[in-house]
């Protein structure tokens, strides 16, 4: 029974992500989500009290399918992660929908900063390792820079979605890093970092 309930919730989450990704929050109705999921209203309201609650779940669980790359170390690993996410944004519906809703929370009727804090922490942890390897300039605060990186990434993906349907997102992220690196790294570290834009075939 519990396993079946979990499967139903997952089905609703995936159907909602597809609808929110395609139509946005305002353009998505509960009936459209249920139609995609092949479920009844009763099944939905057992798990989610409203469309808003379902949208919040999509936001908070956006990274559920993301397998973080483990190649590289220090700064290179962080750069690799951001490029991996750029490709994931092109093909991962749950991530894409969660990011879209996180940006447009006012339309969904809620304001929740938790997902931005979560991503900031993922980046901060990798910056701490970068510091341990001696790859950061002395005045760089790992937490502050991680938050700015999340902000820059968010803006870049919004512009990419509008301009190219995110086709140019990997290149935009490479450009973002090219301008950020001199603020946090010595020249010898920058020369070692590969900023090549990720491609779909590069990411497992």
Image (cartoon, grey):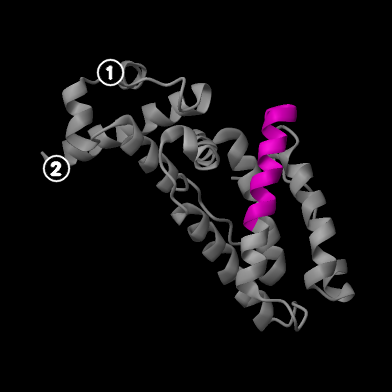
- What is the x, y in percent for residue 24? 50, 26
Residues marked 1 and 2 touching at CB (< 8 Å): no
Position of 10 with respect to 139 (left or right) is: left
Say which element carries label 1.
loop
Question: Which label was assigned to residue 123?
Answer: none
Residue plotted at (65% across, 53% down) = 151
Q: Taking 69 as reference, is 62 above or below it?
A: above
The residue closer to the viewer here, 77 or 149, is: 149
Residue 11 in view (yes/no): yes
Residue under numbered circle 2: 2
Q: Taking 44 as reference, is 98 above or below it?
A: below
Residue reaching furthest to the left: 1
The residue closer to the viewer here, 30 or 201, is: 30
Quarter where residue 79 is shown: bottom right
Position of 101 with respect to 50 (left or right) is: right
- Name the image quarter holding the N terminus: top left
- What is the x, y in percent for residue 18? 45, 26
Disc 1: CA contacts within 10 A as few (<14), some (14-19) or many (>=20): few
Residue plotted at (53% across, 57% down) = 119
Q: Which of marks 1 and 2 is nearer the N terminus?
A: 2
* Count of marks overlaid on the render: 2
- What is the x, y in percent for residue 199? 72, 41
Residue under numbered circle 1: 38
Is residue 10 located in the magenta-colored stretch of the structure? no
Q: Taking 79 as reference, is 128 above or below it?
A: below
Say which element carries label 2.
helix
Query: Magenta stretch?
Result: 150-165
Is residue 152 located in the magenta-colored stretch of the structure? yes
- Name the image quarter holding the C terminus: top right
Helix, strand or loop for the magenta stretch, by majority: helix
Residue plotted at (68% across, 57% down) = 80
């Amino acid at each position: 029974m519990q396993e079946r309930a979990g499967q139903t919730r997952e089905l609703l989450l995936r159907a909602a992500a597809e609808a929110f990704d395609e139509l946005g929050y305002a353009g998505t109705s509960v009936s459209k989500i249920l139609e995609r999921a092949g479920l009844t209203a009763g099944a939905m309201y057992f798990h989610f009290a409203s469309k808003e609650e379902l949208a919040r779940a999509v936001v908070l669980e956006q990274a559920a399918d993301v397998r973080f790359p483990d190649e590289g170390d220090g700064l290179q690993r962080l750069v690799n992660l951001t490029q991996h996410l750029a490709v994931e944004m092109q093909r991962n519906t749950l991530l894409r929908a969660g990011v879209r809703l996180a940006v447009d929370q006012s339309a969904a009727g809620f304001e929740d900063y938790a997902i931005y804090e979560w991503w900031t922490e993922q980046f901060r942890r990798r910056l701490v390792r970068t510091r341990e390897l001696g790859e950061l300039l002395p005045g760089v605060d790992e937490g502050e820079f991680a938050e700015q990186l999340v902000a820059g990434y968010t803006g870049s993906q919004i512009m990419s979605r509008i301009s190219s349907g995110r086709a140019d997102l990997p290149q935009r992220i490479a450009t973002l890093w090219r301008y950020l690196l001199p603020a946090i790294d010595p020249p010898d570290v920058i020369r070692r970092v590969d900023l090549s834009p990720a491609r779909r075939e590069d990411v497992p």
